[in-house]
Image (cartoon, helix red, strand yellow):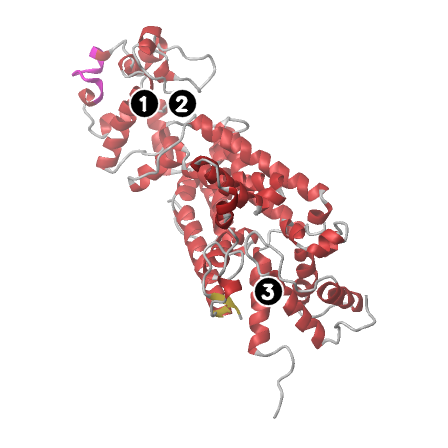
Amino acid sequence: MRPRSGASFFLLLTAAVALAQEPDVTASATSTALDSAPPDSTAAVSEASVDWAPGSTLVHRVDAFVTRSDLRAGVLLSDREAPRVRFSHGLHAQAGVQCAQCHHTGTPEQGKGQACAECHKGAAGVETMHAACITCHRDRGVGPVTCNDCHRERDAGIESLVRFDLYDLLRGPVFIAAWVVFALGCLYRASQFIRLTVRAKRTAVAGGSRGDGRADRGFLGKGRSAPGRLLLGIKVRIRNTILGSNPVMASVSLMFHILLFLAPLLLPAHNTLFDLTFRVSLPSLPERLVDWFTVVLLGAGGFFLLRRLLIPRVRALTTARDWAVLALVMAPFVTAYLAYHQVLDYRIMLATHMAVGELVIAAIPFTAIGHMPFILFARFFASGEYAWKPGNRRWR
Amino acid sequence: MKRKPAGSGAKERAGKRMARLSLSACVHCAICADSCFMFRRSGSDPTYSPSYKAINSIGRIIARRGRLTEAEWAEAQDLAWNKCVLCMRCYCPIGISIPTLIAHARSACRERGYYRTWGSA
């Protein structure tokens, strides 16, 4: 049913949209079960007893029961926003899940009038409920384990075009394809570098590196404390790099490139997906902080754009290619920001974010973003005055 | 001994590939400009920035497979021979060897008869 293989992403996208419009057996079965299920007493009661923001699906539901005294007692707010979970008691009953597995008691009646979040509060509540659902789904090999499959709004309008087929596709095969293209592309570039260079004898000039200020410390370091000497060394080092000669561009660029890696790698949402897929993940930074990283990245993108427009030496080099590369690099961050802040349609924005992100990964070795693998060859494997760790190869 | 036609040898092919690889990685950031003393002495004339000189000489020659107009060859000649002295001081943040590119530009220009003459510039 789901298109798992195909030539190009755009073909797949068209196919996924076309499929989404066809009557999908699994999907309609699910939605029938959801819609025709008798208004479940527990769900109805808990919904009534929870303080839903009217008309909004973005509710800190697990935070709704956290009281002031809880906060004083050290209960942490989850502080996370997600569409409410679409849950079908019918499907779970059919799958043979016993009431007590979730409700603690024999029947749903006994838990009546009590929402899960009344006890499972705040951040700890999120963990408990995520663990309960996801662990069971994982162990049984059925049921959703990713954010959007549970936290989803009712399909409506154009939203229904971006259905789970597309999300699964972008999260699975397209993601893998993007990294395969990236890896093969980088290998190709590395092989080009090796074929186009030869081993070079190390000469004093080629093997040397820029002065690190160490030689000067004998004269100027006298009478300075150890931290003072260290500071002098750092100052000398920095002054002799582009941070010294072109401080604005160099610092914006440095920050941009650091955050370009940190923001996606340390984002909680990405790590959750990573953990769900590989059961390992990197440490996460707070969502709010990564959100600020994104703002800084977007600011740096704006800086590069203005620089291209306003500085003659940059404008003289600028072609359509440069605008395309800038747009390509910024697109994942723009869409991530809009998706996170729920500007425009969340599902479409998220799918676009994943698609452009994967496009960028695949495009790295074949566009000017190829300076990413290139810099490694040039700085570590080629001999030269500016190499960080001069290698022993030179261009033919 | 029969000589191969100019530009078809292994060295030229490697040169072309090296230039294509390097220029494909160039982000056109213009940071190299400040490291060029000729750029600085020219009053920041953008045509003196090292990347401009490489892109509009060897870059253009490769992209067009040598089919340049008379004026474009003359520009490449001017960039590679008059606006660069191959002092090897230019700094590229991503490590592109710009002097190597300019040297290749000179070779390509020389094959077409565009090189430095005592009267020019």
- Residue A132: in sight, yes or no? yes
Is A142 drawn above or below residue A343 in the view shown?
A: below
Q: Which residue is mark 3?
A: B19
Amino acid marked by disc 1: Val
Q: Position of residue A136 (x, y in %)?
A: 23, 31
Q: Which residue is mark 1?
A: A126
User: Which segment is the magenta one?
Assistant: A102-110
Other residues around mark 1 within 10 Å, as few (<14) / some (14–19) / many (≥20)? some
Whether tag 3 and tag 1 are in contact, CB under 8 A, the answer is no
Residue A90, quarter of the rendered image? top left
Q: Residue A80 has which mark? A: 2
- Residue A306 left/right relative to A259: right
Mark 2, mark 3: which one is toward the viewer? 3
| Residue occupying the far left of the picture | A106
Other residues around mark 3 within 10 Å, as few (<14) / some (14–19) / many (≥20)? many
| Residue occupying the far right of the picture | B119
Is A303 drawn above or below residue A125 in the view shown?
A: below
* Distance of label 2 from label 3 (alpha carbons): 50 Å
Amino acid marked by disc 2: Arg
Do callouts 1 and 2 point to residues on the same chain?
yes
The tag earlier along the polypeptide, 1 or 2, is 2
Q: Position of residue A386 (x, y in %)?
A: 53, 56
* Distance of label 1 from label 2 (alpha carbons): 9 Å
- Point 35% across, 7% down: residue: A68
| SS category of the residue bearing label 1 | helix
Whether tag 1 and tag 2 are in contact, CB under 8 A, the answer is yes
Q: Position of residue A303 (x, y in %)?
A: 63, 37
| Residue occupying the far bottom of the picture | B1
